Amino acid sequence: MPLLNILRYPDPRLARVAKPVTAFDDRLKQLVADMAETMYDAPGIGLAAPQINVAEQIVVIDVSESHDQLRALINPEIVWASEEKKECQEGCLSVPGIYDQVERAERVKVRAFDVDGKPFEIEADGWLAVCIQHELDHLKGRVFVDYLSPLKRRRIKDKLQKEERERQRERERDRIAGKGPLSRRER
Ligand code: GNR
Ligand code: NI
């Protein structure tokens, strides 16, 4: 199964609002399997479809250390969030190398469908609650840096754009040297 390429901030495709899934078919199951593999490989505790350039409401999450608690959330909705908030250090596979504090609801209740179209609910706290809110933001076109100050956001954008230009230069150099395109692992 192929690893999927993860878009990096500030790619405008990360800012699109994801559409609901309408067909619970083999294509969806394959996509979820590929997203899970990509998430574990990264490694990350969650991945939302917009991050792999699919503008649909699909999320995979596994906050366990044993990597055996995979959940797929299709068309998820937060139906309740606690008044109590907490600050948490967040990172994002689409914002590599950047970590900062974000305020989230301490507990949430989320309603979603599994890959077979069966509805379920999760009441979450701890890392799972943080991750659910982070992933559902991706479906709305939001990334955690949107909660930071304009100054911090500007610095993060500049840093990642500089890194992107550097990667492009390297690709160009390798192309001229006659090497093939790099695999995701080498990038
Ligand atoms: O792997 C991830 N770790 C993480 C840590 C703190 C808060 C949120 C996250 S989600 C992130 C993976 C990711 O970018 N999902 O969209
Ligand atoms: Ni993320």
Image (spheres, rainbow, N blue to C red):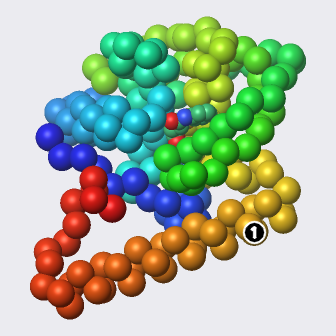
The one of 137 and 80 positioned closer to us in this rendering: 137
- Whether 73 is drawn above or below 97: the answer is above
The residue sitting at 83% across, 63% down in the picture is 150
Identify the image quadrant of the C terminus.
bottom left
**Quadrant where ligand 1 appears:** top right
Which residue is labeled 1 in the image? 154
In the image, what residue type sits under mark 1?
Answer: Arg
> Circle 1 — which element?
helix
Total marks drawn?
1
Q: State which quadrant residue 176 falls in.
A: bottom left
Q: Is residue 136 left or right of residue 113?
A: right
Expressed as whole percent of the image width and height from the top left, the position of residue 129 reads 64, 20
The residue sitting at 56% across, 44% down in the picture is 92
The one of 88 and 13 positioned closer to us in this rendering: 88
Can residue 172 be seen here? The reply is yes
The one of 152 and 2 positioned closer to us in this rendering: 152
Can residue 23 be seen here? The reply is no
Expressed as whole percent of the image width and height from the top left, the position of residue 62 reads 43, 22
The residue sitting at 41% across, 30% down in the picture is 60
Q: Is residue 185 left or right of residue 71?
A: left
Label 1 beta carbon less than 8 Å to ligand 2:
no
Expressed as whole percent of the image width and height from the top left, the position of residue 165 reads 48, 80
Expressed as whole percent of the image width and height from the top left, the position of residue 153 reads 75, 62
The residue sitting at 79% across, 60% down in the picture is 152
- Whether 83 is drawn above or below 12: the answer is above
- Whether 165 is drawn above or below 186: the answer is below
